[in-house]
Image (cartoon, helix red, strand yellow):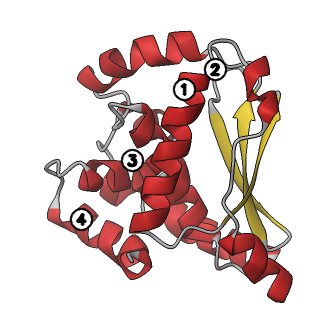
Amino acid sequence: FKEKTKTHLMKIQFPDDVYKIRGFTKEVRKELESALQKLKLEYDIRLNSIFVEKTDEYDIFVTGYHDGVVDMIINQNADFNEIIRRIPQYYAIGKFAGKSLEDYMAHEMAHVMLYQDCKSDNEYRAKYQQIENLYDIMAGISGYADKLQSGNEALAEAFVRVRNNESISPIVKVLVESYFGGLKK
């Protein structure tokens, strides 16, 4: 318990191998680290570690629960030049709720917050399925969540929209408050 608490209190940093990623500059790292620290000032976020690994072609970040902790992977195959160029375009057409790198980080930290209190794989799987089953209520929050028909992605996208004071349905706003409100500092 003491080790987990100590890890939770440590400042999570992006590893130096982020520079292996195309377009991941010192400025991008600074922007993402600043976004992460801002989010951690607003919410209780217990991200265990950040790694750089190759993932699916279209992933930018992958957040996952394992062994009682939540880690984040940054896709070594990503192209941050292209990601940054497309953020405004994807926001404008409703593909993503995020309109900045900070919003993309908020989306990933929403995934962290959803599962950071899970104490077992069974608890994680049950909560994951519970949230997946919310998709029908949240359909239309973004093209990304709709394409995947994922309650988990829709809830993370709704979290971003609420942080940006965007108009969403009252029931989705209640869901965001119920899952994340107790984590506000």
Estimate how packed mark 4 is, as few (under 14), some (14 to 19) or many (20 or more) residues with alpha carbons within 10 Å: some
- Determine which of the numbered discs, if any, sits on residue 12 in the image: none
| Frontmost residue, 156 versus 105 | 105
At mark 1, the secondary structure is helix
Q: Which residue is mark 2?
A: 24
Which quadrant holds residue 41?
bottom left
The three-letter code of the residue at mark 1 reads Val
At mark 2, the secondary structure is loop
Marks 3 and 1 sit apart, C-alpha to C-alpha, by 21 Å
At mark 3, the secondary structure is helix
- Who comes first in sequence, dot 3 or dot 4? 3
Q: Are marks 1 and 4 in contact (CB under 8 Å)?
A: no
- Determine which of the numbered discs, if any, sits on residue 173 in the image: 4
Q: Residue at x 70, y 67 (%)?
A: 10
The three-letter code of the residue at mark 2 reads Phe
| Frontmost residue, 99 versus 141 | 99
Front position among marks 1 and 4: 1
Whether residue 17 is situated above or below residue 136 in the rendered picture: above
The three-letter code of the residue at mark 3 reads Glu
Q: Quadrant of the N terminus?
A: bottom right
Q: Which residue is mark 3?
A: 157
Q: Residue at x 53, y 24 (%)?
A: 27
Q: Position of residue 121 (x, y in %)?
A: 80, 73
Marks 1 and 4 sit apart, C-alpha to C-alpha, by 31 Å
Q: Which residue is mark 1?
A: 28
Q: Are marks 3 and 4 in contact (CB under 8 Å)?
A: no
The three-letter code of the residue at mark 4 reads Lys
Q: Position of residue 120 (x, y in %)?
A: 80, 80
Q: Are marks 3 and 1 in contact (CB under 8 Å)?
A: no
Marks 2 and 3 sit apart, C-alpha to C-alpha, by 23 Å
Which quadrant holds residue 93?
top left
